[in-house]
Image (tube, helix red, strand yellow):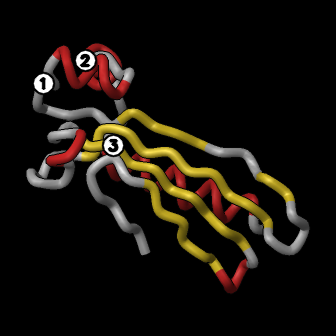
Amino acid sequence: GYYITNNLSYTVAMSENDFLVAVHCTTSGVQGQYMGSDEKEVIYIAYQALNVTEKQLLDGQDSIIKSEQSITPSLQMQIGITQQEIDKGVSFQEAITKVIHHQSNTSR
């Protein structure tokens, strides 16, 4: 499954394929000590896969997610993503599809 929360990383075990996948998501919401106190859109997703059997780090992928909402200049500074990059981003569905297709192609 996908575990997404405000700017936190999770590791998800893919036991049937002997892969470990680390996923990192950032939202357009509040950061710092109040992180997660609001429910905002995911604007960045990245992951890195590890072939546990072969102890090999596989190619990672990341995507900037397009958002209809503007993010504040201070948030842009905190997360290192500009409004222009978000405006040109992909849909959340496209980003997740990219992760799933990349994972299935590397597990063959």
Disc 1 to disc 3: CB gap under 8 Å: no
Across and down, in percent, residue 57 comes to 79, 53
Please tell me in which quadrant of the rendered image residue 3 appears: bottom left
The x and y percentages for residue 108 are: 80, 68
Could you tell me the amino acid type at mark 3? Answer: Thr
**Residue found at x 29% / y 25%:** 86
Which element carries disc 1, helix, strand or loop? Answer: loop
Residue 26's disc is 3
Q: Position of residue 1 (x, y in %)?
A: 43, 75
Q: Which mark is residue 83?
A: 2
Discs 3, 2 touching: Cβ within 8 Å: no
Does residue 45 sit above or below 73 in this rendering?
below
Q: Bin the neighbour count of mark 2 within 10 Å (Cα to Cα): few under 14, some 14-19, many 20 and up.
A: some
Secondary structure state at the residue bearing disc 2: helix
Instruction: Say which residue appears at 50% left-offset and 45% top-offset.
Output: 46
Figure check: 46 above or below 8: above
Q: Position of residue 35 (x, y in %)?
A: 20, 48
Q: Are marks 2 and 1 in contact (CB under 8 Å)?
A: yes
Residue in view at x 75 percent, y 59 percent: 106
* Amino acid type of the residue that numbered disc 2 sits on in the rendered structure: Gln
Q: Which amino acid type is shown beneath numbered disc 1?
A: Ser
